[in-house]
Amino acid sequence: MNRCRIPWPDAQRRAILRALPAAGLMGLAPGAWGQGAYPNRALRVIVPQPPGGGFDFVARALAERLSKSLGQSVVVENKSGSGTLVGTDAAAKVDPDGYSLLLGSVSNIALNMGLYDKLSYDSLRDFEPVGLAVSYSYTLMARKDLPLNSLKDLVAYAKANPGKLTYASAGNGSGQHVLAAALWHLAGVNLVHVPYRGAQAAYQDLLGGRVDLFFDLSSTARVQVNAGTVKALAVSGAERNPMHPDVSTILESGVAQLDLESWFGYFVPKKTPLDVQERLRAELAKVIAQADLQDNFRKAGGKPLSLSAEQTRALVRRDVERWTKLVRDIGIKAE
């Protein structure tokens, strides 16, 4: 049987051949090229602090819900050491494929940039925020028998008596140290820093009257404030904390233009494919908006956040630039 072959013009034949590969790929979703649709295996979240702390609490609360949203396991990996340096450095060096995330906070994303002269990563160059879930303010506590009842009174006394008041921290370069040192610097007063190895020892001496002042996360400070074992003089947020509604903010006191809330959220390496970033950002936004998660954060003393991608980037950039400069101006160094 003879078959009739219809000749195709060369230009038309070339156009059809060029169209075939594209037609075969049209059914693939973004991110599906080569390895199948994202995600097709478990993800991990690197937490640069040991289990049991604020970093770990937020990371696990988000991971559990993100796992259900993505249909893949999200494993929390605690990688602590040198404060938050070891875990954050490891996260900066992972393959930027969207399968490794970092739990980022003001501590490792913003403060470290000023605390260390030779940092192995640059927060703005090497990381991209996926979403911020919650923030926590700090409360300035005074020993209960300190004859000063407001931050304004404290600053006035410190100006008249330089070097007489002492303040505790959980160690050089800790969040408690940086915030307190920034406040005294901006207020123009001189207080003596007493660094401890961890917050527990600082609390012991504050309660024992051996140190005058201590900044700590409001969620932790609440226990002692409510028990009446210490006095709350100020909170660090831009707004009053619902846990201490009668306590003024630093801004309200008028002694310094300073506010700090320690936010927590997920970050990925900057070179992570954009379609993967957007998938993660969309799924995490759904998680952050869940009412039960927000209730859990509030019960733990936090303020749930609801920020757009642009607002998130702007907040991270603002805090990195502001705190890097302030920490360097003061001359604070980590241990």
Image: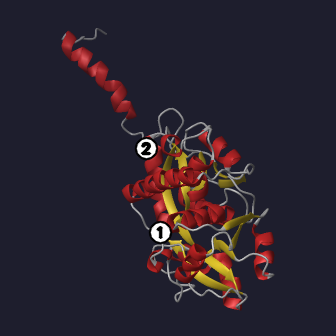
The image quarter containing residue 182 is bottom right
The image quarter containing residue 63 is bottom right
Residue 120 position, x and y percent, is 62, 38
Residue at 64 percent across and 47 percent down: it is: 88
Residue 205 position, x and y percent, is 80, 76
Residue type at numbered disc 2: Asp
Image quarter where the N terminus lies is top left
Secondary structure under tag 2 reads helix
Residue at 67 percent across and 47 percent down: it is: 85
Front position among marks 1 and 2: 1
Residue at 71 percent across and 84 percent down: it is: 224
Residue type at numbered disc 1: Leu
Image position of 93 with respect to 72: above or below = above
Residue contact between numbered discs 1 and 2, judged by CB atoms under 8 Å: no
Q: Which mark is residue 275?
A: 2
Secondary structure under tag 1 reads loop
Kindly tell me whether residue 248 is visible in this rendering: yes
Which of 61/110 is in front? 110
Kindly tell me whether residue 298 is visible in this rendering: no
Distance, label 1 to label 2, CA atoms, is 24 Å
Q: Earlier in the sequence, mark 1 or mark 2?
A: 2
Residue 97 position, x and y percent, is 55, 39
Residue 192 position, x and y percent, is 69, 66
Which of 87/130 is in front? 87
Q: Identify the coloring.
A: secondary structure
- Compared across the picture, whether 227 is left or right of 295 comes to right
Residue that mark 1 sits on: 305
- Local crowd size for mark 2, using a 10 Å CA cut-off: few (<14), some (14–19), many (≥20): some
